[in-house]
């Protein structure tokens, strides 16, 4: 269970009931944001350092993912550091509370005298931290504090997250490659590859009953625009069960498969329904061995709870782009209760079960982790997703399917085009720029807004 340390400070000469009242209100505001706290307050600069020592001892009995340094009044720097130096390895929030009005008179406990004395010191000591200050008469900024704490929780989770990848470098693409050592060092994420032969071997050992159960209780509940071939549905169920068994055994949180040169070429089966079933189970999924796309998805899921489905780009317009998929979308991106699917074939490929679900519209954030010149950069674009015009990708069986897509308005298509790093970008709904930036600041990743 993720926990956050919370320490409330105030100077020894400030009335203790005022410091306690302010710290209590801040604590309750963070709990209302959904955080589980390990709280210690008040901590003052008493000469014997009794409260400092008690705080260190109390905090040492638990573990947590980040530390909130709550400054409820003026506090000498040394009293704070004697606590925080035990946790310099953790992300921190330096949170200054504020005064209040009594009639037409402002009353302050000099909270920002404390924080301004600490901010430069924290920076000089190399702490990873965010500075947040409240303003008299405004809503407390507990939401800003909580967002940074959730980023810290995500950063810790990434240390044990694993991507399971069948095969490597589909279609010999360059934009989907990764450097394992630097990726692990920077993000903590491990990418493990497994062979497609293992999928096939597990598939061959499955019972017909196991596959039929998935067809009857999962696949046939989708909205089919026309009937699918039973053999195609049974293959989808079988390959899904094979991949899921591997993922469960090895604790993979994300799955990518060799698509065009793997499942389609070697197994004769387009893998869209495999991804769709895995997505319904809560796995993040991306095709074509997209390594950094998969890592971006894990980041987005940790920060937002969303699966962070991918879209790729088909056309650029003056103020928007056409972004869609030729196969599947994440289960939480569909505008409706279930997938809408269509049996269809593309070019020389065998018939597959294509996801043609309508995509949810609205404000969204496109993001992608990029590796360039030896360092990691997070591309972030705030956009607005609209229903796309009627369109088709040349090569599908006629009448061609209306592929799942959005027309995404963005601040500058030209700037995006000048910096775009891959055909896949990860979609999350809402304006998630702040929480993505929080995580990147903790991991030491530059953020580039396009």
Image: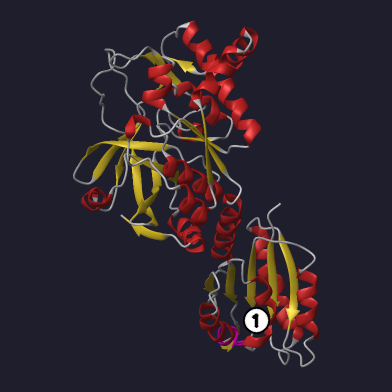
Tell me what residue is drawn at x 65 percent, y 77 percent: 85
Mark 1, other Cα within 10 Å: few <14 / some 14–19 / many ≥20 = some
Q: Is residue 224 left or right of residue 250?
A: left
Q: Which secondary structure, mark 1?
A: helix
Task: Looking at this view, name the residue that lies furthest to the left.
Answer: 318
Where is mark 1, residue-wise? 81
Tell me what residue is drawn at x 63 percent, y 58 percent: 33
In the rendered image, which quarter is residue 65 located in? bottom right
Q: Is residue 312 magenta?
A: no
Q: Is residue 75 left or right of residue 169?
A: right
In-front residue for pair 252/321: 252
Tell me the colour scheme of the image.
Answer: secondary structure
In-front residue for pair 30/107: 30
In the rendered image, which quarter is residue 103 located in? bottom right
Q: Is residue 189 left or right of residue 205?
A: left
Q: Is residue 15 left or right of residue 118?
A: right
Q: Which residues are drawn in magenta?
A: 107-113
Taking 435 as reference, is 399 above or below it? above
Q: Quadrant of the C terminus?
A: bottom left
Taking 333 as reference, is 209 above or below it? above
Tell me what residue is drawn at x 33 percent, y 33 percent: 172
Please provide percent x and percent y for residue 319. Answer: 22, 46
Would residue 380 be seen by someone viewing this image from the given angle?
Answer: no
Would residue 239 be seen by someone viewing this image from the given angle?
Answer: yes
Please provide percent x and percent y for residue 376. Answer: 40, 56
Please provide percent x and percent y for residue 228. Answer: 45, 9
Q: Is residue 110 magenta?
A: yes
Please provide percent x and percent y for residue 106. Answer: 57, 87
């Amino acid at each position: 269970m993720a926990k956050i340390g919370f320490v409330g400070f105030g100077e020894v000469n400030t009335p203790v009931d005022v410091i306690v009242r302010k710290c209590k209100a801040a604590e309750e505001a963070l709990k209302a944001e959904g955080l589980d706290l390990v709280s210690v307050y008040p901590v003052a600069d008493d000469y014997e350092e009794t409260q400092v020592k008690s705080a260190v001892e109390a905090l040492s009995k638990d573990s947590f993912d980040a530390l909130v340094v709550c400054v409820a009044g003026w506090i000498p720097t040394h009293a704070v550091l004697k606590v925080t130096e035990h946790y310099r390895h953790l992300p921190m929030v330096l949170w200054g509370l504020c005064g209040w009005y009594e009639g037409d008179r402002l009353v302050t406990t000099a909270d920002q005298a404390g924080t301004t004395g600490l901010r430069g010191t924290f920076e000089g000591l190399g702490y990873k931290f965010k500075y947040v200050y409240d303003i008299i008469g405004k809503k407390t900024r507990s939401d800003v504090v909580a967002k940074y704490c959730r980023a810290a929780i995500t950063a810790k989770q990434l240390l044990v997250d694993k991507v399971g990848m069948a095969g490597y470098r589909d279609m010999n693409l360059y934009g989907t490659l990764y450097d394992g050592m630097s990726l692990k060092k920077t993000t903590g994420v491990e990418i493990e590859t497994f062979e497609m032969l293992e999928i096939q071997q597990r598939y061959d050992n499955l019972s017909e009953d196991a596959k039929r159960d998935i067809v009857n209780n999962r696949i046939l509940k989708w909205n089919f625009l026309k009937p699918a071939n039973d053999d195609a549905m049974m293959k989808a169920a079988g390959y899904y069960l094979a991949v899921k068994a591997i993922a469960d055994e090895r604790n993979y949180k994300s799955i990518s498969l060799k698509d065009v040169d793997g499942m389609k070429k070697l197994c004769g089966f387009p893998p869209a329904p495999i991804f769709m079933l895995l997505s319904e189970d809560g796995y993040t999924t991306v095709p074509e061995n997209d390594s950094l796309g998969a890592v971006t998805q894990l980041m987005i899921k940790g920060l937002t709870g969303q699966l962070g489905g991918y879209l790729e780009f088909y056309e650029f317009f003056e103020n928007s782009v056409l972004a869609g998929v030729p196969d599947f979308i994440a289960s939480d991106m569909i505008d409706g209760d279930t997938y809408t699917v269509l049996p269809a074939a593309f070019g020389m490929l065998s018939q597959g079960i294509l996801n043609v679900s309508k995509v949810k519209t609205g404000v969204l954030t496109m993001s992608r982790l990029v590796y360039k010149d030896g360092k990691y950069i997070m591309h972030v674009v705030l956009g607005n997703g609209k229903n796309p015009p009627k369109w088709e990708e040349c090569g599908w069986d006629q009448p061609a399917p209306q592929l799942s897509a959005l027309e995404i308005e963005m601040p500058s298509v030209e700037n995006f085009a000048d910096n775009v790093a891959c055909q896949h970008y990860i979609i999350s709904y809402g304006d998630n720029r702040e929480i993505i930036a929080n995580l990147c600041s903790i991991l030491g990743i530059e953020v580039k807004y396009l």
